[in-house]
Image: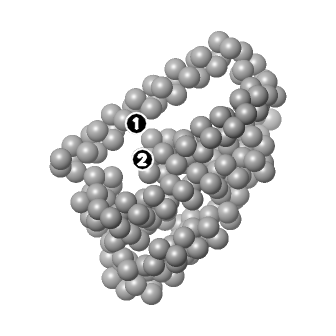
Amino acid sequence: MSPTVSRRLLNVTTLLVLLATIGLTIYWWRLGVFADLPHLQAYLNGSGLLGPLIFIVIQIIQVVIPVIPGGVSLAAGVVLFGPWSGFLYNYLGICIGSMINFLLARHYGKPFIMHVISEKTYDKYIGYTTNQKQFDRLFALAIFLPVAPDDVLCLLAGLTKMKTSTFTWIILLGKPVTIAAYSWALVTGAQWLMKLFG
């Protein structure tokens, strides 16, 4: 299967996930869980471990197959589960997804990556991998300070000689800062807009 066909399938998958999300949203709306935020939170908390597990799986999928904008799911985690639990679920999902990306790229190599990202994106970032020590530092900085697409860099890291343990530690230690910063900014921004237009 060519990368072009794979990306088309990815686009179709994205559309199907979007339609499924809309369907689930309509279902929840008819149940009345969107009547107010406490009602929705109570609904999710009443589902036991199922709600958090579903959310974590969604986060993993959106990292490996970017069907939902990452910022949207980050904010959703904090809004739906609260700042601490939401952060934890975001952190688990994103870290697991990032590690899956790294391992898939390491196992299947460039052909796999070309099924996920465009050749233009690949060419834009592959040059950074020529010097391993420099790439390791750049990768750590990019994860700690989100200045580049993390998912793409995780895939490219799988093509380098970076140790799995090094990758894991960078993700585990670097992601909390970016997740917390993104979540705070998105939720604060949303609250400000609600006050402004509410």
Position in image of residue 35 (x %, y %): 75, 19
Position in image of residue 71 (x %, y %): 59, 48
The residue tagged with tag 2: helix, strand or loop? loop
Q: Earlier in the sequence, mark 1 or mark 2?
A: 1
| Res. 108 image quadrant | bottom left
Position in image of residue 114 (x %, y %): 27, 57
Q: Quadrant of the C terminus?
A: top right
* Residue shown at 71% from the left, 22% from the top: 34
Which residue sits furthest top? Answer: 30
* Above or below for 97 versus 23: below
* Residue shown at 49% from the left, 62% from the top: 99
Give the Cα distance between marks 1 and 2.
8 Å
At label 2, which amino acid type do we have?
Answer: Ile
The residue tagged with tag 1: helix, strand or loop? helix
Label 1 Cα crowd, 10 Å radius (few <14 / some 14-19 / many 20+): some
Residue holding disc 2: 65
* Above or below for 78 versus 50: below
User: 74 or 112: which is nearer to us?
Assistant: 112
| Res. 110 image quadrant | bottom left
* Above or below for 127 versus 98: below
In-image side of 32 versus 152 (left or right): right
Which residue sits furthest left? Answer: 2
Which residue sits furthest front? Answer: 49
* Residue shown at 52% from the left, 76% from the top: 165
Residue holding disc 1: 14
At label 1, which amino acid type do we have?
Answer: Thr
* Residue shown at 39% from the left, 31% from the top: 15
Q: Is residue 149 visible?
A: no
User: 171 or 104: which is nearer to us?
Assistant: 104
Label 2 Cα crowd, 10 Å radius (few <14 / some 14-19 / many 20+): some
